[in-house]
Amino acid sequence: MLNIARRCVPFTPYDRDLSKATVALISAAGVYLPDQEAFPTEDPGDVSYRVIPAVTEASTLRIAHHHYDHSEADTDPNIVFPIDTLRELAAEGVIAAVNEQNYSYGFTTRLRELYETTFPELADKVERSKTKLVLLTAGCPETCHRSIANLAREIEARGIPTLIISASPAATESVRPPRAMTWEGVAIGRVIGRAADRAFHKRVVRAALEMFTHDTPPGKVVTKQVR
């Protein structure tokens, strides 16, 4: 577990072109594949995670999470786990590729175990992969948004730039993440936009990715206007 004071924000600059970056996606939205075990939907949850391959179609994903309304995301999981959008941006040359393995975990109040066991393991896997940038999202407005920000700090301390797309800016900023953005109109359960609006999803994710190449205030959540 990363053991630095909250006032210190781990920050790794990214000074290369986005088109050369392999991007990993990690979410606390509770997504999983049909052949994987669902996350528990009773407190305290657990500290496990699921591996989501880069070739996964978002439409095949399932969601098990009992602390946010994912009814719209059930019809289009891409709005909380934008794997389709990242793959489209890779096909267009905006990024080089989506990392072969991406990750998801669900709701838990077993935070000490999550931070001391699961997060270092996930950070190890990211560090050993081809990942150059990490994009993160979350499900519930409080616990999940704070936990994913802690994971971002853990990964950033390994020298890999991270960015959270937040639907709960106050919770995210309370943890002082390395980089984070929100956009006007964002809502819990549809972090990337409304279901099936693929063009808008792409604009949101592209706006997030572009933040890696701009001066971004560490520890803050930047509000973007996405049209």
Image (cartoon, rainbow, N blue to C red):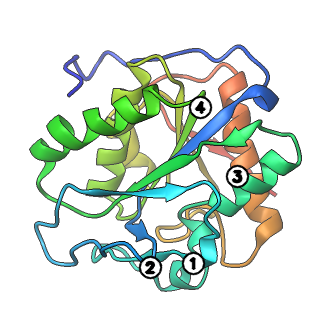
Q: Is residue 182 above or below residue 69?
A: above
Q: Report the residue marked by disc 2.
A: 34
Residue 112 x, y percent position in the rendering: 10, 42
Left or right, 168 with reference to 223: left
Residue 133, label in figure: 4
Residue 87 x, y percent position in the rendering: 73, 54
Q: Which numbered disc, 3 or 1, marks the residue closer to the eye?
A: 1
C-alpha separation, residue under disc 2 versus residue under disc 4? 27 Å
Q: Can you see residue 162?
A: yes
In terms of secondary structure, where does tag 3 sit?
A: helix
Q: Is residue 114 above or below residue 22?
A: below
C-alpha separation, residue under disc 2 versus residue under disc 3? 21 Å
Question: Label 2 amino acid?
Answer: Pro
Residue at horizontal 66 percent and vertical 75 percent from the top:
194
Q: Report the residue marked by disc 3.
A: 86
Residue 140, label in figure: none
Question: Label 3 amino acid?
Answer: Leu
Quarter that holds the N terminus: top left
Q: Which numbered disc, 2 or 4, marks the residue closer to the eye?
A: 2
Image quadrant in which you'd find residue 14: top right
Of the image marks 2 and 1, the number of the one nearer the N terminus: 2
The furthest residue to the right:
92
Residue 60, label in figure: 1
Of the image marks 2 and 3, the number of the one nearer the N terminus: 2
Are the two marked residues, 4 and 1, in contact with CB atoms closer than 8 angstroms?
no
C-alpha separation, residue under disc 3 versus residue under disc 1? 16 Å
Label 1 Cα crowd, 10 Å radius (few <14 / some 14-19 / many 20+): few
In terms of secondary structure, where does tag 4 sit?
A: strand
Residue 219 x, y percent position in the rendering: 43, 27
